Image (spheres, rainbow, N blue to C red):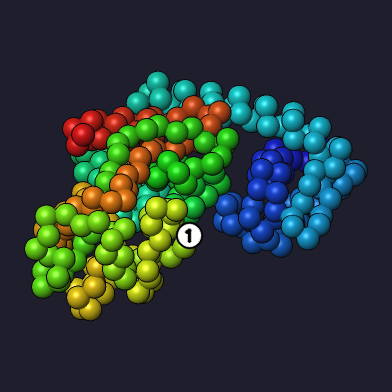
Amino acid sequence: MKTNVDHQLRLFVEIANCKSLSAAAETLSLTQSGLSRQLSSLEGYIGQPLFVRHGRGVEPTEAGRKLLEAASTAYQLIDNTLVQLRDQHGVTAGSINVATIHTLSYYFMAEVVARFMSQRPNANVALLGRSSPGVVELVEAGRAEIGFVYDSAVASDELDITPLFEEEMCLVVHESSRFAALAAVSLNQETPPLVVFPASYALRRMLHSRAFNATVAAEVETVDAMLKLVSLTNGQCVLPNLIPEKLLREYQLKRIPIEQPVMRRRIVAITRRGRPLPAMTSLLLEIARASAENAS
């Protein structure tokens, strides 16, 4: 009997979950050719194919579905037991990948991560800035243990959602802008050209609705690039009202409240459904909840 069947079964389960050899190889940090050889070896041991290959990826055969059901149940029980045993002994070292939309890294995530690191100084935290769909994708694929994103971007039955807080948008303009002296602005009436994020970003989609359709002056992928461009061109953009005043002053910018249309979004934490949270993920979520309560 083969000695590496258990390892190959783990790889088989990941391929089935990803529905693609290339996606599974990326998740596992393996080459696609190496993963394919492992799968072929397992299929040879069993004596029949486990997947049907097609243009979009792979689908389990009848034998593959039967094996997947048994292996998934067994490994979930094993993994859950391992997590429980580690939690009982208060594991304080290790690594955690945290995915977040870009804007949150400027006013929420820094405090959350700092508080986490003060309680777990031996842990390694990787903060992964992405667009809203990118955050969801990282958590769904297991490449991030927890994500922070707009609730409107989450449409997946594979994720658990923890509401945190609401944020309101404001107009950010240069200090010399004609808007700078206003107490508030109605974008429905003014419709100024805006520096915006790409179309895949949730904040960009907020700017295009039945009530208001933004005029796009330029498109950028990061908050820093947006602020710099607004500063250099005497332009304007829409960002969360919680963007730090100190950061705006560095670019000679100021925020103006938006009266119409009302632009609010709820920030949520997302984790993979059906799996117990590791101790460090639970702690970081607890800290995020507390930080959200203090901010509201």
Give how far across and how far down residue 235 sits, in percent: 24, 73
Judge left or right: residue 198 versus residue 38: left
Q: Secondary structure at mark 1?
A: loop
Residue 157 vs residue 31, the one in the foreground: 157
> Is residue 94 something that shows in the picture?
no
Q: Amino acid at mark 1?
A: Ser
Give how far across and how far down residue 90 sits, in percent: 35, 26
Look at 40% across and 25% down and name the residue there.
87
Q: What residue would you read off at disc 1?
A: 200
Residue 29 vs residue 138, the one in the foreground: 138
> Is residue 66 something that shows in the picture?
yes
Look at 74% across and 57% down and name the residue there.
56
Residue 251 vs residue 15, the one in the foreground: 251
Say which quadrant the N terminus sits in. top right
Mark 1 crowd level (few <14, some 14–19, many ≥20, 10 Å Cα): few
Residue at the limit of the structure toward the right, as seen here: 47
Look at 42% across and 41% down and name the residue there.
151
The part of the image, by quadrant, that contains residue 23 is bottom right
Give how far across and how far down residue 58 sits, in percent: 77, 51
Judge left or right: residue 9 versus residue 168: right
Look at 46% across and 63% down and name the residue there.
199
Residue 265 vs residue 177, the one in the foreground: 177
Residue at the limit of the structure toward the front, as seen here: 189
Work out whether 181 lies above or below 80: below
Give how far across and how far down residue 200 sits, in percent: 48, 59
Tell how many labels.
1
